[in-house]
Image (cartoon, helix red, strand yellow):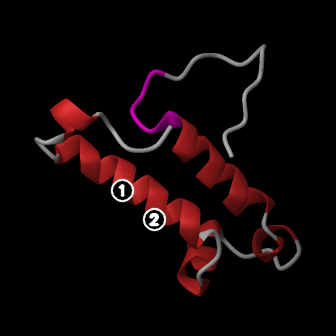
């Protein structure tokens, strides 16, 4: 779920909500915190896979010409 803060600066980039949640998921995962691994290594192990797919779909929808009518995926 997206996280909303009152004092947070507005990020106008595409897929900002998914990007923020994906980043938070990786940095707060036990793989990074307890094991001390890099986030890229944890991705290869399959952690936060749902958010990774959502972020990919959002970025891919930016290139899709049909998205002009449907809007970008993500939040």
Residue 43, by quadrant, is: bottom right
In the image, what residue occupies the spot 80% across and 59% down?
28
Looking at the image, residue 67 lies above or below residue 50: above
Residue 44, by quadrant, is: bottom right
Residue topped by disc 2: 53
Front-most of 37 and 15? 15
Looking at the image, residue 6 lies above or below residue 14: above
Image: magenta residue range: 12-16
* Label 2, label 1: how far apart the Cα atoms are: 6 Å
In the image, what residue occupies the spot 60% across and 78% down?
41
Tag on residue 19?
none
Front-most of 20 and 53? 53
> Position of 28 compared to 65: left or right?
right
Q: Position of residue 25 (x, y in %)?
A: 70, 58
In the image, what residue occupies the spot 42% across and 28% down?
13
Most common secondary structure along the magenta stretch: loop
> Position of 25 compared to 18: left or right?
right
Let me know if residue 15 is in the magenta part.
Answer: yes
Query: Residue at the front extreme?
Result: 70
Q: Are marks 2 and 1 in contact (CB under 8 Å)?
A: yes
Front-most of 24 and 72? 72
Residue topped by disc 1: 57
Query: Residue at the right extreme?
Result: 34
CA neighbours of label 2 inside 10 A, class few (<14), some (14 to 19), many (20+): few
Front-most of 6 and 73? 73
In the image, what residue occupies the spot 33% across and 48% down?
59
| Tag 1 secondary structure | helix
Q: Position of residue 36 (x, y in %)?
A: 80, 74
Let me know if residue 45 is in the magenta part.
Answer: no
Looking at the image, residue 13 lies above or below residue 56: above
| Tag 2 secondary structure | helix
CA neighbours of label 1 inside 10 A, class few (<14), some (14 to 19), many (20+): some
């Amino acid at each position: 779920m997206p996280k909303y803060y009152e004092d947070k600066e507005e990020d106008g980039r595409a897929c900002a909500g998914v990007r923020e949640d994906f980043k938070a998921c990786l940095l707060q995962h036990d793989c990074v915190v307890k094991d001390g691994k890099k986030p890229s290594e944890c991705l290869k192990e399959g952690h936060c896979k749902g958010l990774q797919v959502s972020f990919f779909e959002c970025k891919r929808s930016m290139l899709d010409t049909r998205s002009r009518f449907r809007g970008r995926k993500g939040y």
